[in-house]
Amino acid sequence: MNPLSYKSGKPPIPPGGPTLPIPDEGEEFIARERFAFWRRFCENKTAVFGLVVLAIIILATLTADLFLDADLVNLQDAYSRGLAPFMHSDKELERIAAGEQVITHILGTDGFGRDIFTRIVFGARSSLTIAFVTIAISCAAGLILGVGAGYFGGVLDTVVMRIVDVFMCLPPLLFSLSIVAALGNGMWNLILAVSITMTPFFTRVVRATVLSVASMDYIEAARANGATQLHIVLRHIIPNCLGPIIVEATISLSAMIMIAAGLSFIGMGVLPPSPEWGAMLNDSREFMRDAPWMVLAPGLAIMLTALSFNLVGDGVRDALDPRLKK
């Protein structure tokens, strides 16, 4: 035996070098399931297209400061009002003739002379922030309420589900509008309103999944081995509920973007002059006939982002469907 290994109390290193850890059956199963999920997802060409488009939108949003000037977001120019895409005002043409560098309005300008492309890219931050923060709050609240109602049952289940039934009777947009009207305008009030609106949907999905998981044999085996309720919930119930939650969250992102844009369109969302796609639609609706590009740009941004989330959600749902596993 190597004396250094004996003194250090560590096992000796074999002549062929250190041995690699051998994965157990659980690790192999997880790796195999991940590969199978990704393979089934990539077989869905529309889902891959949605993922690519969504990745481009998110990447452009995160790196906007590198290729766009943030000062142009709210910079108004009376001489550049209502310019068509790739057009310049007379003042800008004079500056170009003098050798100065002038921004190219790829999507034109709005009624205040602000560059639409810059506002679209930076406005994506507001829209995506509202969507992702809302989905995180709704998932967390729905997970807690759904697990409590589905696993523990009894009076808690009755009270939670009756409240959920009442909230689900209200149209999501109208319910969010009433909450924002009570709290006031602003991004965080909008996030809170949409989160409260979407939480009942996640609660119902989680509860249905918990009811099916709680009746499995391994749950009974865990109880027979003396596992506590907290251990069963954290180690067995919640991990086996993540699949339906991920599917519901991915599909619901498009609905959250639409609700947020709708509230901002009627002036109940993000406060001006901060760029947001719904608010941009509201600002440009009076120019629809003379300058349709003002409406088309934010409208296409909302449609493309919502469509991408829907395509990715459908792909995730199909990839997680047990009936597709071979």
Image (cartoon, helix red, strand yellow):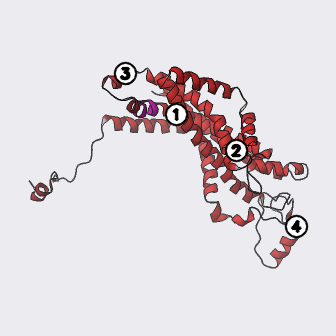
Marks 3 and 4, the one that precedes in the sequence = 4
Q: Earlier in the sequence, mark 1 or mark 4?
A: 4
| Residue 144: mark in rendering | 1
Q: Is residue 127 magenta?
A: no
Q: Is residue 254 above or below residue 297?
A: above
C-alpha distance separating marks 2 and 4:
31 Å
Residue range (magenta): 233-239
Magenta stretch: includes residue 236: yes
Q: Label 4 belongs to which residue? A: 79
Label 3 vs label 4: CA separation? 74 Å
Write down the quadrant of residue 315 in the picture: top right
Work out whether 115 lies above or below 264. below
* Mark 2: secondary structure: helix
Which residue is rendered at x = 75% and y = 39% of the image?
177
The amino acid type of the residue labelled 3 equals Glu
Tell me the residue that label 2 is attached to: 304
Q: Nearer the viewer, mark 1 or mark 4?
A: 1
Q: Which residue is mark 3?
A: 220
